[in-house]
Amino acid sequence: MKIVGVELRRIAMPLVSPFRTSFGVEEIRDVLLVRVESPDHEGWGECVASAEPLYSAEYTDGCADVLRRFLVPAVTALPNPEATAIGPALAGFKGHRMATAALETAVLDAQLRGLGISFAGFLGAVRHRVPSGVSVGIMDSIPQLLDAVAGYLDQGYLRIKLKIEPGWDIAPVRAVRERFGDITLQVDANAAYTRRDARHLAQLDEFDLLLIEQPLDEEDLPGHALLAAQVTTPICLDESITSARAAADAIELGACSIVNIKPGRVGGYLEARRIHDVCAAHGVPVWCGGMLETGLGRAPNVALAALPNFTLPGDTSASSRYYRTDITAPFELVDGHLAVPDRPGIGIDPDPAALDEVTVSSEWIRR
Ligand code: NPG
């Protein structure tokens, strides 16, 4: 494949309601889109970094900078810039996985469009639809939380994930369990606790949660292993799993028994698939995380979530969970599921008018 040039486009996407986690609040999503142009096709990649480096070290301006100065020039200089060549070509640049993932996804999209192959087909999907869960942010009060959860259950979501932090954990989980009975329920701490909180977190055991996600610091794999021995709720890792090697280490240490896979966090769909395979080989189930993606980022996530070892519902929600107007045709929930796109590449295109409406800036990097 040839690359003519790469566009870095910034869009501002207002969320339907503020999304609060233990590390901050998002109200308008600052999204960086990468568009790769080949002579015959274009390909899109959505960078999942947020405006501030609070979830991980990456942030939107930083991603744009590293792409512009290092990653894009290294990739466009390749004689045959195909997706499998990108990892090796960028291996010398440390970190910057979200930026790398956006570029690799855009290249893979253009490449697969040229070949007439869908992401689902390329990755090895085995399902035509995937079950959807929803992530519910931290709220001001328990009645407000119960109203939000009731609304999502009415819409058909098959699993509820509650964001927790110290001071917003046992009581909201108890309230949701008592009000809604045996729904599929899990919690996400985004690393808000420390090893000293093990006894406190063990109080969650009575609520029969599917899992607790990333209770401790992303670097504290041994702490997660210690915690796993002190609670009965299965531990799932998100932030800690930055690569297939990290997944293998975490599993060997006993730090987790479930893994959340986010392609952006791990440098792209090729590494995401390797993590899927490592986990499958160890009998560790995985699910697909979400980063408030627009339709452009959601489409390939839904394809990934259709692989065989994605046995738990993902944060693959409908577009309307986050955006009143998406930049693509909206993903809609049907019986609690999203359909896996089956057209070539990511299988969806931005709506030009909707995209222009939210565009803040655009820059073109010629090969
Ligand atoms: O459904 O897209 C979604 C969001 C799911 O809770 C969710 N994402 O910690 O996993 C997370 C959280 C997140 C969102 C993290 C945005 C960072 C940025």
Image (cartoon, helix red, strand yellow):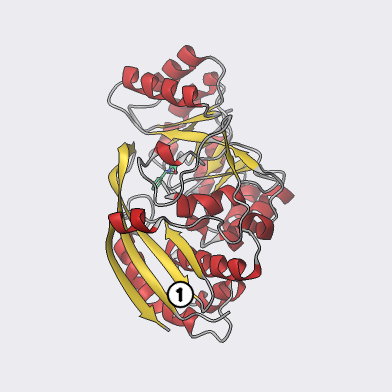
The answer to whether residue 49 is left or right of residue 230 is left
Residue 219 visible here: no
Give the residue pinned by disc 1. 93
Quarter of the C terminus within the rendering: bottom left
Q: Residues within 10 Å of mark 1 (few under 14, many from 20)?
A: few
| Residue 216 showing in the rendered view | yes
Instruction: State the image coordinates of residue 90 (x, y, percent, origin top left).
Output: 50, 75
Q: Quadrant of residue 22?
A: top left
Q: Which residue is depicted at the point 43% across and 68% down? A: 35
Residue 322: name its quadrant.
Answer: top left
Query: Which quarter holds ligand 1?
Result: top left
67 in relation to 14, above or below:
below
* Between 228 and 17, the one nearer to me in the picture: 17
Please report the residue visible at 68 percent of the width from the left and 51 percent of the height from the top: 125
Q: Name the amino acid, label 1.
A: Phe
Residue 244 position in % (x across, y down): 61, 58
Image location (x, y in percent) of residue 316: 52, 41
Q: Tell how many labels.
A: 1
Task: Give the quarter of the figure containing the N terminus.
Answer: bottom right
Q: Identify the residue at image location x=59%, y=28%.
A: 232
296 versus 144 height, above or below: below
Left or right: residue 64 compared with residue 240: left
Element under disc 1: loop
